[in-house]
Image (cartoon, rainbow, N blue to C red):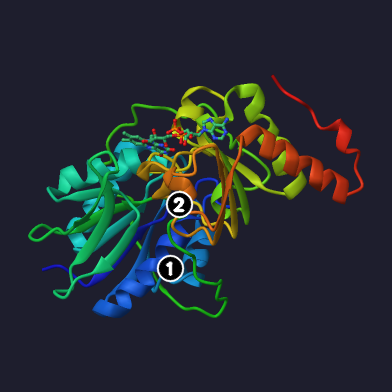
Amino acid sequence: MNTNEIWVFGDYRNYFQNRVTLQILGRATDLARKTDAVVCAVVFGHQVDEYVREYVAHGARKVYVVDHPDLMEYSVEGYAHLLVGLVRNHNPGTILVGATRFGQEFTPRVAKMLNTGLTADCIDLSIDDKGRLVQIAPSFGGNLIARIITPQHRPQMATIRPGTFHELPHDDHAVGDIISIPMPQDMPPKRVRMVSSEYRPAGKQRIEDADIVICGGRGMGSKGKFKKLFELARLMNAEVGATRPVVYANWIGHDALVGQAGKNIKPKVLLSFGISGAIQHTSALSDAQFIVAVNKNPNATMMKMADVAIVADANQACLGIIKAIRQKLNLDPAQTEESE
Ligand SMILES: Cc1cc2nc3c(=O)[nH]c(=O)nc-3n(C[C@H](O)[C@H](O)[C@H](O)COP(=O)(O)OP(=O)(O)OC[C@H]3O[C@@H](n4cnc5c(N)ncnc54)[C@H](O)[C@@H]3O)c2cc1C
């Protein structure tokens, strides 16, 4: 018999940069209201009290914790084994996991071991009239948005892309039950040993959290010309994002990829330069509040979805904005770099 619990897997690596667990707890709280479910977090690790408290403060009403020195490092096999054991004992109705690199590797194993379905990389979640989880995800190369349910098997499982949902405000007075689970005796042997790990931020702030994002596409023309966007970003305190061709051409790192295969963004202002507006890119922009697009083609999809569409050469427009800002800031406009 499945319990009416929604489990959110606690992915706390790089905690201060990685907010995906808190974001999922936020949406799980909405879903739980509609189904009278209990939002639970599941935390594996060592000396994880701080994260447990954070999850309670952000919406978890119950936290299942396995705390053991052997769990200090993430191990896909060990964590999958632990979660499967826990699910078999407690029968949650739903499990939600961040679609981080770890979540993308770990969650399919868990779904397979539990013989249930999994929808990867959801961009939204809702509840249907039978109380089932509707898992909304891009499909067929992003050309369709699929609404997927798991009619028979349980738990219902989904991974959710970072930046998709909003976290609830931190509530210091929130109360949650902490369920301590002993480490099982039958853990699988570790086949991988972590030698070291470090977080490498792409910029000052994460693109998912930035109020101003400047996105560049193939229409910027070359790596050298694309660099102008970094100068503009510095002047506007913005982050730079990119389309897939740009990332594949190595004009910028993969962390900047905006779209189905990358990040969802929710800036107050999005400046888009030389981007056609393929669905795989625009599906990640639905929360952008105000869009300015520059493209030499007025009929490009990106221009049609923009609040302000400027028909111009992307490089010239970028350079013009840089000069105007430098002038406004009393900086020497002549110092703006021309690139090849
Ligand atoms: C499974 C799958 C997943 C994908 N995931 C992603 C993803 O996550 N993110 C993503 O972005 N894409 C993704 N794609 C690729 C996507 O389909 C598009 O190919 C891509 O978004 C196009 O990038 P673009 O707009 O930079 O290039 P193009 O489509 O080539 O557009 C370039 C634009 O620049 C304009 N332009 C050209 N020169 C100038 C100039 N001098 N001045 C002004 N404008 C100019 C052109 O008019 C055109 O509109 C995915 C594709 C698949 C199949």
Residue 15 locus on image (x, y percent): 55, 51
| Whether residue 212 is visible | yes
- Which residue is tagged 1? 26
The image quadrant where one finds the C terminus is top right
- Left or right: 140 in relation to 319: left
Location of the N terminus (image quadrant): bottom left
Q: Position of residue 218 (x, y in %)?
A: 51, 30
Q: For the residues marked 1 and 2, what is the alpha-carbon distance in whole angstroms?
A: 32 Å
Question: Residue tagged by mark 2?
Answer: 304
- Residue pictured at 73% horizontal, 36% vertical: 319
User: In the shown orientation, is residue 187 left or right of residue 221?
Assistant: left
The answer to whether one can see residue 185 in this image is no
Is residue 125 left or right of 101 when viewed as pictured? left
Q: Quadrant of ligand 1?
A: top left
Number of numbered tags placed on the structure image = 2
Q: Residue furthest top?
A: 340
Q: Nearer the viewer, residue 173 or 65?
A: 173
Mark 2: which secondary structure? Answer: helix
Q: Identity of the amino acid at label 1?
A: Gly
* Residue at 38% in and 67% down: 27
